[in-house]
Image (cartoon, rainbow, N blue to C red):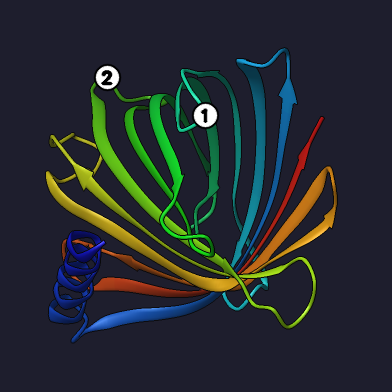
Amino acid sequence: MRKICLSLLLIIVQISAHAEDTIEDGRYWLTLNHDYHLNDQWRINLHLQPRWRNEGSAFDQIIYRPSLYYKVNPSLSLGAGYGFILTHLPSGGNTHEHRIWEDVIYQTNLTEQIKFLSRSRLEQRALEGQSDVAHRFRQTVRFSMPTHIINGLSAVFYDEYFINTNNTSWGVHRGFDQNRAFIGVNYQLNPHANMDVGYLNQYVNRPNVDAENHVLAITVNTQF
């Protein structure tokens, strides 16, 4: 636990060091996330996420990610999937990105109250019209605990750190790419559905002026 807290502190310090000159924006992200269990070990995940920028007045992206996961044991799962990302450019026109990615997910109870999840992801990203492939590593840590205010309501915090491992001709630069920090709540709607609602801070490293996006993030999770 101490190592985790120190790692999160280092992430926050690094973001603060970069945050002197940034372009800020308000955004909205809606995520629909569904798990279909084939049996006790295999599940299919379907992920759909539309995003809006310019304080929600303009469409930004839509992301579709189907994937397959295998439960090694109650704590460890391995997965792989495909991602299609359509981005509407502020200057007009769209870009189409295709991703293949691999996941390692570890989850456990740190205490009787605190749940912990770690997700390590490798991505291979290809942009239509470009020949080279970008490789990126993403590390997520998530903590949740019941609030004891409303039955089924939990407090949630997660942080996701992105690192590019190569350069490309289409604007990817090796090194720190972005960080996403979320704080909010999770509510258990019924035995098959729950919802995350909260604030997400997205800090994006750019060659000239960095970007900091203030995001209202809503995620609906369902499973059968």
Tell which tag, 1 or 2, sits nearer the viewer.
1
Toward the viewer: 50 or 67? Answer: 67
Residue type at mark 2?
Ser
- Residue corresponding to mark 2: 131
The residue drawn where x is 46% and y is 61% is 143
- Determine the CA span between mark 1 and mark 2: 40 Å
- Point out which mark residue 32 bears: none
Amino acid on which the number 1 mark rests in the picture: Pro
Residue 102 is situated, as x and y percent measured from the top left of the image, at: 38, 24
x and y, in percent, of residue 75 in the image: 46, 33
Callout 1 secondary element: loop
Rendered residue at 77%/65% (across/down): 152
In the rendered image, the vertical position of residue 133 relative to residue 14, given as above or below: above
Quadrant of the image containing the C terminus: top right
The answer to which image quadrant residue 38 occupies is top right
For the residue pair 219 and 59, the one nearer the viewer reads as 219
Residue 74 numbered mark, or none:
1
Q: Which of 68 and 4 is in front in this view?
A: 4
Q: What element carries label 2?
A: loop
Residue that extends furthest to the right in the rendered view of this protein: 190
User: Which of the 4 image quadrants contains residue 66?
Assistant: top right
Foreground residue among 92 and 214: 214
Count of numbered marks: 2
**Left or right: 224 as drawn, with respect to 203:** right
Image point 21% across, 46% down: which residue? Answer: 163
Outermost residue on the front side: it is 112
- Residue 90 at what x, y percent from top left? 50, 61
CA neighbours of label 2 inside 10 A, class few (<14), some (14 to 19), many (20+): few
Lower position in the chain sequence, tag 1 or tag 2: 1
Which quadrant would the N terminus be assigned to in this image? bottom left
Within 10 Å of the Cα at label 1, are there few (<14), some (14-19), or many (20+) other Cα atoms?
Answer: few
Residue at the image point whose x is 42% and y is 34% from the top: 105
